[in-house]
Amino acid sequence: SRALRPIATVAFQNGAKNFSTSPEMQFKVMVAGAAGGIGQPLSLLLKMDPLVSTLALYDLAPFTPGVAADLSHMDTPSKVLGYRGPDELPSAIADAHVVVIPAGVPRKPGMTRDDLFNVNASIVRDLTQCIAVHAPKAIICIITNPVNSMVPIASEVMKKNGVYDPNRIFGVTTLDIVRSRTFIGQINGVDPKTVKIPVIGGHSGVTIIPVLSQCKPAPQIQEQAKIDALTKRIQEAGTEVVKAKAGAGSATLSMGWSGAMFTHSVLRGLKGEENVVECAYVKSDVTEAKYFANPICFGKNGIAKNLGYGQLNAYEQKLLQLAMPELKKNIEKGEKFVK
Ligand code: NAD
Ligand code: LMR
C-alpha cells in the first residue's frame, strides 16, 4: 500500500541526474498532541530515531510551530514539520506511516483515568476520523487515557469509515512494562534493561496485571505479601506520579521515553525485522474481553502475531478475574460513545 511504503533515502551524486537509493528504510511519524507534556519529550526522542525520516508535529497550542522549529535545529537527519489547529491536520497526517496520539487532558490528584473520558473521547474520535480519511493505512498508537476505552473508540471510527484493520491500532501500555522493569531491577540489583516481564490486561488500576511468575530474572522476593505489594505498586505507579506532581499533570518524561521505544519497535516491524515483540493493548480474542494487552509480535502490517499471555499462576489468574469486569465496562463505554 502507498501509505506504508517506506521512504527511500535518496543520495544525489554530483548534484546531477545520477542518484542512488540507499537500502535504509525510513518513515513518516506524526505526533498528535506534540506540544504537550508527553508530546515534547516524545518528539525529542523520535528526532533521534534513525528510522524516522519525517516528523510531523501537530497540536492545538499556538506555540506548536516553535516546538517544531526548536527540534528542527537538532543535528539529526530527519525533517521536522509543525502543524497547528484542525485546518492543518490533514497535511500533518497525509502519508504518515505511524500516528502517535498523546493528545488530551491528564489526571489531577483524586481522579481516575476514566474521569478523563468525557474530554478525551471526542479528541481521539476526531483525530481518528481524520486519519481514516487521510492516512487509512497508518499504524495508530494511542497514549491518551483512558487507553482501555480510547482504542475501542478509534476502532469504531475506522469501522464507520470502512477502513478498519485491527492489526494497525495499538493502545500504548509500555510505561507499565518500563516501570515493572525498573522496580524489579532495583529489587534484584540488576540493570532494569535486562529484566523481561509481560504486563497484560489493560492500562488502569486493577486492569494492569504484571505477570511476575514469567519475569526473567525472577524477582528476588518470596513472600506473597511482598509480591502483592510489588503488584500494587506497578498498578498504582501512575497515581504515584500524579500525586507527586500535585495538580500539574501525570507522567510525561517516562511516558515520552516509553512512547519512543514503542514507536521504534513498530517501525522495526514495518521495516521487515522479525521477532520484534512488545506488550500492547489490541483487538483480541485471547480472553472474553474484546481488547486485551499482552505480548505482540510486530510486522510489516502492524500485528504479525498475537503471542497471548502464556501461563499464569493462581494469584495472577485471580488478578485477571478481577480485571475482566472493569476492562469490559471500559470497552463497552468506548464503543457506545461512537455508535
Ligand atoms: P498535556 O496537557 O501536557 O498535553 C496534551 C496536549 O494535547 C496539549 O499540548 C494540548 O494542546 C494537546 N491537545 C488537546 N486537544 C488536542 C487535539 N484535539 N488535537 C491535538 N492536540 C490536542 O498532557 P500530557 O501529560 O501530555 O498527557 C496526555 C495524555 O496522555 C493524557 O490523557 C494522559 O492521561 C495520557 N497518558 C497516558 C499514558 C499511558 O501510559 N498510556 C501515560 C501518561 C499519560
Ligand atoms: C500513567 O500510568 O502514568 C498514565 O496512565 C497517566 C496517569 O493518569 O496515571
Image (cartoon, grey):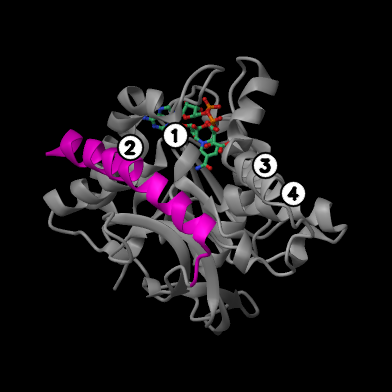
Between circles 2 and 3, the one closer to the viewer is 3
Identify which residue, 286 or 224, lies in the foreground: 224
Q: Residue at x 68, y 45 (%)?
A: 225
Q: Which amino acid does label 1 sit on?
A: Ala
Which one is earlier in the sequence, the residue at label 2 or at label 4? 2
Q: What residue type is labelled 2?
A: Val
Q: Residue 124 carries which label?
A: 2
Q: How far apart are marks 2 and 3 (CA)?
A: 34 Å
Q: Is mark 3 on a helix, strand or loop?
A: helix
Q: How far apart are marks 4 and 1 (CA)?
A: 28 Å
Queried whether the magenta region covers residue 318, the answer comes back as yes
Dot 2 crowding, Cα within 10 Å, few <14, some 14–19, many 20+: many
Name the residue beneath numbered marker 4. 183
The x and y percentages for residue 281 are 41, 55
Q: Do the residues labelled 3 and 4 touch (CB within 8 Å)?
A: no
Q: Which amino acid does label 4 sit on?
A: Phe
Q: Are marks 2 and 1 in contact (CB under 8 Å)?
A: yes
Name the residue beneath numbered marker 1. 103
Q: What element carries label 2?
A: helix
Q: Which residue is drawn at 27% across and 47% down?
A: 152
Prevailing SS of the magenta stretch: helix
Between circles 2 and 4, the one closer to the viewer is 4
Which one is earlier in the sequence, the residue at label 3 or at label 4? 4
Asked if residue 214 lies left or right of residue 157, the reply is right
Q: Do the residues labelled 2 and 3 touch (CB within 8 Å)?
A: no
Q: Residue 151 carries which label?
A: none
Q: Is mark 1 on a helix, strand or loop?
A: loop
* First to last magenta residue range: 311-339
Name the residue beneath numbered marker 3. 229
